[in-house]
Image (cartoon, helix red, strand yellow):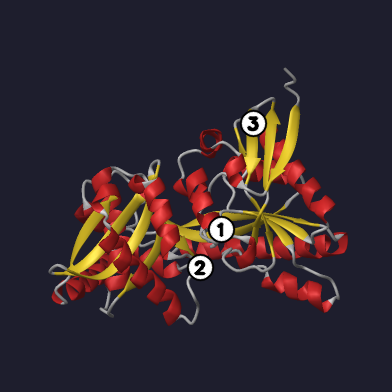
Amino acid sequence: MDSSPRLTLETDLRRIDARAWDALAGDQPFLKHAFLCALHDTGCASPRSGWSPHYLALWRGDTLAAACPLYLKSHSRGEYVFDYAWADAFERHGLRYYPKLLCAVPFTPVTGPRLLAASDADRLRMAHAMAAFAEETGVSSLHVLFPAEADRLALESAGFLLRESVQFHWRNAGYADLDAFLAAMSHDKRKKIRQDRKKVAAAGLAFRWLRGAQIGPAELDFFYACYQGTYFNHGNPPYLSREFFARAFRADPDAFVLILACRGEQPVAAALNLAGGDALYGRYWGAAEYVPGLHFETCYLQSIAYCIAHGLARFEGGAQGEQKMARGLLPTPTWSAHWIADRRFAAAIEDFLERETAAVAGYLGELEAHTPFKRRAG
């Protein structure tokens, strides 16, 4: 049998065996074959919504050796790494920025594998293959969002430009319970959290944690109404449909961790997290009424308490938001990698990224100087 590597390009992920894909993707729920198919099949990430799937796959014989999720994009929405200024610069110089190629999980600012491979050699092979495909396609650029460390190193070796950003993550220091976590925080931060918790309790609210089979259609309906309301309150339609959540839940129910704030039996707010491996990922939230402190309690404190109770190593609180530091989430670098076809623009963007990286380093240093935790003596 010929075991020399060959590349294929699939516009339908179902043409790649789910078990083979998942074996490369690891334990993060967002990269699972069923999760991605749910995004496509429900139209949330489809050519009609400006996300045209182009899955690059590396084969040795009939064995899937590596793969990556690629999308031809006609816009930059739903990415959480902002390149609107780059698009504007292209347009002002009479050049077309869209379509562009994107390697990412749609609507998901979570660091994880992007060059799905079992070896560093195949990761590097996929990085070069992506760039070659971008050049053949004639797109302006190729962007890899939130790659894992091994992928970042391969992309840098392949000549991609790196861009640094910041998220806020909580890490479990072996806390016995939530009180032990709060005791590790500085006095002013601990006092503010307790004040907010008292406001939530005074509103008659208590919390329920539901996972997997404990979540029924009524709970998903309530969550979706809250999620939808959050988007409409900001003047935008939601990216994800109720059918998407139904399909993703059916495919992997144990990944779903729903936190409900309830007044008696009546739910008032909801935060939906996804669990995978040793992590909990905060993703979607909404509330039927405004209660001071409810957002932080539902999305962050309850998620941290869940991680402590279930021995999870970290909680990732989503994109941006330095206000999360006051709840014990600490600044964590994230990355993206960029290939630009036009050499003039590549040089200009490289210069911009060098200056931006220095600014991010300064920002990280400033944030780290304002830790919410007690400072150790000496």
Tell whether 289 sits left or right of 5: left
Q: Regarding mark 2 in the picture, which secondary structure is present there?
A: loop
Q: CA distance from mark 2 to mark 1?
A: 9 Å
Q: Front-most of 54 and 15?
A: 15
Q: How far from the left and from the top, in percent, is residue 299?
A: 33, 64
Q: In the visual, does 146 lie left or right of 131?
A: left
Which class describes the residues within 10 Å of circle 2: few (<14), some (14-19), or many (20+)? some
Secondary structure beneath disc 1? loop
What percent of the width, then of the height, locates residue 223?
Answer: 32, 66
Residue 190: x and y in percent read 25, 65
Q: Compared to 31, does 18 lie above or below?
A: above
Q: Which residue lies at the image location 63% right of the left edge and 31% below the top edge?
A: 64
Marks 3/1: CA–CA distance: 23 Å
Q: Is residue 232 left or right of residue 184?
A: right
CB within 8 Å, label 2 to label 1: yes
- Looking at the image, can residue 7 be seen? yes
Q: Quadrant of the N terminus?
A: top right
Dots 3 and 2: beta carbons under 8 Å? no
> Counting residues from the N terminus, which is met first, the one under dot 3 or under dot 2?
3
Name the residue carrying label 3.
Answer: 65
The Cα–Cα distance between marks 3 and 2, rounded to whole angstroms, is 32 Å
Instruction: Mark 1: give few (<14), some (14-19) or many (20+) Cα within 10 Å.
Output: many
Q: Amino acid at mark 3?
A: Ala
Which residue is labeled 2 in the image? 239
Between 196 and 361, the one lying in front of the other is 196
Residue 40 drawn above or below residue 158: below
Which amino acid type is shown beneath numbered disc 1?
Pro
Could you tell me the amino acid type at mark 2? Answer: Tyr
Residue sitting at x 58%, y 53%: 146
Q: Which residue is mark 1?
A: 106
Q: Which residue ends up furthest to the top in the rendered image? A: 1
Q: Tell me where residue 56 sits by quadrant.
A: top right
